[in-house]
């Protein structure tokens, strides 16, 4: 899938590095950049007689003014670039921030989340709950110190024959086609019809190869370690500049947004990580 529209979600209080990374990514892909600068306010607080407190109203006005100022600064920073872009601002609350973000993600090919935004755990959670799990859009999170712009020399595609992994492979095709080599990486694969086939990884490798992707199948043993640890180590060993994987979530009643492997990768991985659900 060609990347023509990129949604970069920026935190209003800290966005310079994330914006620079998003602009570089869009310049590489010739894509339109939608810079969405977000401020998430606290829920209303009430004083005596259930009247909204004046301090909360003052804080809300201050945050809205800061958001507008940040949007203007972002417009100014992008105006000098040879880049198609627009800047949007969003003031929301935690209760419905995921729905507001999901609505914006519907109209993008990929959502970018840089380190400044991702380091705020609550902010990151609302973005993933909205953009990843309520919209059909992959999220590329980069918590490392280097911008993800140039095509990577190597990519690790975590593969387990699931719908999520297949969706991640399809939605990242533009990136995979540009990579020097894609490692289809399987941890403790089982050769079984209806799951991985008689030769695990062969079918997805053939699919990718027909799209012009240079591919290699790597079947790894877990050695008693978690799958995310094996995937992350393999990415380092192969010099990968990107990890692509499916994202799994639990039902809301379990009070856990991510499945274990997905959650640990998001929290610990410092390589660019593309997730699709």
Image (cartoon, rainbow, N blue to C red):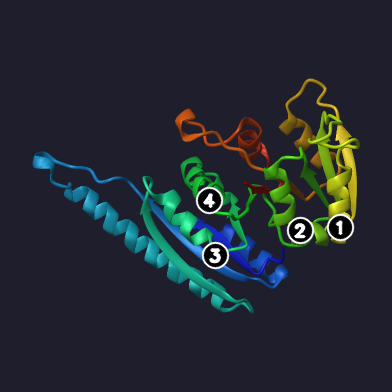
Inspect this view and state whether residue 95 appears.
yes
| Residue that sits furthest to the top in the current view | 224
The answer to which quarter of the image holds residue 224 is top right
Query: Residue 78, percent across and down?
Result: 56, 73
Q: Residues within 10 Å of mark 4 (few under 14, many from 20)?
A: many
Identify the mark at residue 107; answer none if there is no mark.
3
235 to 181, vertically: above or below? above
| Residue matched to label 4 | 117
| Residue matched to label 2 | 173
Q: Earlier in the sequence, mark 4 or mark 1?
A: 4
Q: Earlier in the sequence, mark 3 or mark 2?
A: 3
Separation of marks 1 and 3 at Cα, in angstroms:
26 Å
Q: Earlier in the sequence, mark 4 or mark 3?
A: 3
Q: Secondary structure at mark 4?
A: helix
Of badges 4 and 1, nearer the viewer stands 1
Look at the image and tell me in which quarter the N terminus lies.
bottom right
Query: Residue 110, percent across and down?
Result: 62, 59
Q: Secondary structure at mark 1?
A: loop
Please tell me how many numbered marks the rendered image carries.
Answer: 4
Q: Residues within 10 Å of mark 1 (few under 14, many from 20)?
A: many
Q: Residues within 10 Å of mark 3 (few under 14, many from 20)?
A: some
Give the camera-side residue of 70 and 186. 186
**Residue at image location 63% in from the left, 33% down from the top:** 264
Q: Secondary structure at mark 2?
A: helix
Separation of marks 2 and 1 at Cα, in angstroms:
8 Å
Identify the mark at residue 213; answer none if there is no mark.
1
Q: Earlier in the sequence, mark 1 or mark 3?
A: 3
Of badges 4 and 3, nearer the viewer stands 3
């Amino acid at each position: 899938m060609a990347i023509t529209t990129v949604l970069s979600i920026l935190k209003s209080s800290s966005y310079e590095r994330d914006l620079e990374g998003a602009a570089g990514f869009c310049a590489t892909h010739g894509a339109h950049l939608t810079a969405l600068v977000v401020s998430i306010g606290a829920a209303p607080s009430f004083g005596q007689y259930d009247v909204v407190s004046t301090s909360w109203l003052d804080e809300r006005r201050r945050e809205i003014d800061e958001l507008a100022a940040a949007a203007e600064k972002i417009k100014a920073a992008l105006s000098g670039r040879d880049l198609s872009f627009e800047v949007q601002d969003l003031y929301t609350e935690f209760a419905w921030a995921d729905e507001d973000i999901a609505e914006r993600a519907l109209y993008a090919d990929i959502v970018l989340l840089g380190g400044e935004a991702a380091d705020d755990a609550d902010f990151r959670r609302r973005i993933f709950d909205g953009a990843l799990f309520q919209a059909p859009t992959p999220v590329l999170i980069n918590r490392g110190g280097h911008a993800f712009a140039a095509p990577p020399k190597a990519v690790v595609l975590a593969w387990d024959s699931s719908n999520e992994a297949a969706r991640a492979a399809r939605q990242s095709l533009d990136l995979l086609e540009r990579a020097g080599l894609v490692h289809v990486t399987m941890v403790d694969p089982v050769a079984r019809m209806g799951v991985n086939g008689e030769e695990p990884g062969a079918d997805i490798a053939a699919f990718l190869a027909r799209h012009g992707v240079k591919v290699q199948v790597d079947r790894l043993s877990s050695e008693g370690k978690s799958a995310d640890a094996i995937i992350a180590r393999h990415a380092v060993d192969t010099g990968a500049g990107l990890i692509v994987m499916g994202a799994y979530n639990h039902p809301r009643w379990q009070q856990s947004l991510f499945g274990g492997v997905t959650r640990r990768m998001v929290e610990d991985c410092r390589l660019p990580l593309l997730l699709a659900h």
